[in-house]
Amino acid sequence: MSPIFALPLPPAEDWQAQARAARLTTAELLVRVGLTAADFPAGVVADPDFPLSVPPHYLSLIRRGDPADPLLLQVLARGEEALPQPGRLTDPLAEADYRAAPGVLRKYRSRALLIASGACAIHCRYCFRRHTDYGSVMLTRSGEAEALALIAGDPAIDEVILSGGDPLSLTDARLAALVSAIAAIPHVTTLRLHSRTFLAIPDRVTPALVDLLAGIRLNVVIVTHSNHEREISGDVSAALGRLRAAGVILLNQSVLLA
Ligand code: SF4
């Protein structure tokens, strides 16, 4: 088994090119990590509804030649996914019951969650929103006014959460417009972003993003979704360090994976 598999990355400043380079077929991924379908007891599958997406940086962290690599297992669709599973749910958190306005989930009185984007840089096989029809539930420009009006109309809401999909899939300009509109609501004090893009494409932490989050009046909390220590590469540490230096509070939410 060789150590880390190095790949040439698209230009560091072009995080969107890195996101585009993430789309791989199962066969391409296997070649790049030095494995074949026969290395997995139930084989591998292709799922056109939730295709592989593995950005070059994340791919570079996967151990070559190791079918049990914990990073690989998070992104490779294995045959077990296609097996019948009694009790499997397509909406395990019953989020359909909490839709309060276009693009808004409201589970708690003091918080509103915006499905800010339907896209993710990395596709995680365990994702609890992998069956979500984002076309019908995510925040759209036409629905944004209604969503913001709901938040503005309820002083109990002091925290707005940007989720998805992944809110860091939005451009800096789009994020700036959305964040500015949220910051303009006086009773909102905290902005929370949930994103796995920091781990998958650390170059997403652009100077414009840091300036945006450092410059708003809100407390900014970022929740990374790291599930393994090897996801915290030197580049990821540096990117998170730039956010920390800008006053952002960093938290992590992990999935317990077998
Ligand atoms: S980044 Fe989050 S929302 Fe996107 S596929 Fe992974 S777990 Fe799901």
Image (tube, rainbow, N blue to C red):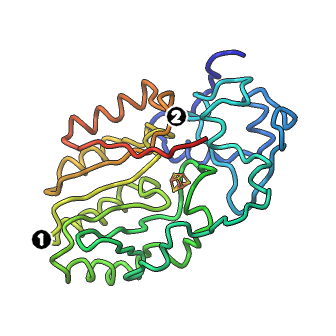
Q: Is residue 39 above or below residue 151?
A: above
Residue type at mark 2? Pro
User: 127 and 59: which one is in front?
Assistant: 127
Q: Amino acid at mark 1?
A: Pro
Q: Residue at x 45, y 44 (%)?
A: 254
Q: Are marks 1 and 2 in contact (CB under 8 Å)?
A: no
User: Tag 1: Cα neighbours inside 10 Å, few (<14), some, or many (≥20)?
Assistant: few
Give the residue number, with chain letter if any, for mark 1: 186
Indicate left or right for 143 with 76 as reference: left
**Where is the C terminus found, in terms of image quarters?**
top right
3 with respect to 199 (left or right): right
Percent of width and height locating residue 146:
33, 84
**Residue neighbourhood size for the residue with mark 2, other residues' Cα within 10 Å, grouped as few (<14), some (14–19), many (≥20):** few
The residue lying at 73 percent from left, 48 percent from top is 77
How far apart, in angstroms, are the residues tagged by discs 1 and 2?
Answer: 40 Å
Across and down, in percent, residue 239 comes to 36, 34
Disc assigned to residue 11: 2
- Tell me which corner region of the image, top left, top right, bottom left or bottom right, holds residue 160: bottom left
> For the point 54% across and 49% down, which residue is it?
121
